[in-house]
Amino acid sequence: MCAWQIRLYPRDCKLDNTFASVARVPYQILLLNTFVNLIIVLCADSHIVIYGIQQKNVQHGMLGLI
């Protein structure tokens, strides 16, 4: 079971899980940074993972990880 997650919430919505975009990460996150439309993650197992961020729904400002 994966205990670590990255969660994105739209700026205009409540911090509610129904609006969240969730990516499961296998190891603890040591460092998280953003660059343009990317999230760069350094995990405890020394791997660097790069996620792209895209807007799923223009009307509701929903975000998604790719």
Image (cartoon, helix red, strand yellow):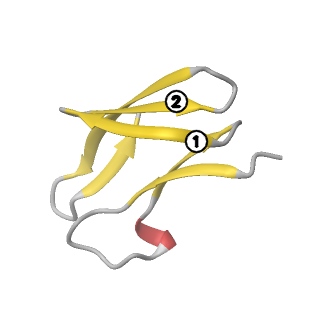
- The answer to which of 6 and 14 lies nearer the viewer is 6
Spatial distance from mark 1 to mark 2, Cα to Cα?
6 Å
State whether residue 58 is above or below residue 34.
below
Circle 2: is it few (<14), some (14-19), or many (20+) Cα within 10 Å? some
- The answer to which of 49 and 16 lies nearer the viewer is 49
Horizontal arrangement in the rendering, residue 35 relative to residue 46 (left or right): left
Horizontal arrangement in the rendering, residue 64 relative to residue 6 (left or right): left
The amino acid type, in three-letter code, at marker 2 is: Leu
The image position of residue 50, as x and y in percent, is 43, 25
The image position of residue 38, as x and y in percent, is 30, 31
Kindly state the secondary structure of the residue where label 2 is placed.
Answer: strand
Residue that label 1 marks: 29
The amino acid type, in three-letter code, at marker 1 is: Ile
Residue situated furthest right in the rendering = 1
Horizontal arrangement in the rendering, residue 37 relative to residue 44 (left or right): left
The image position of residue 18, as x and y in percent, is 47, 71
Count of numbered circles in the view: 2
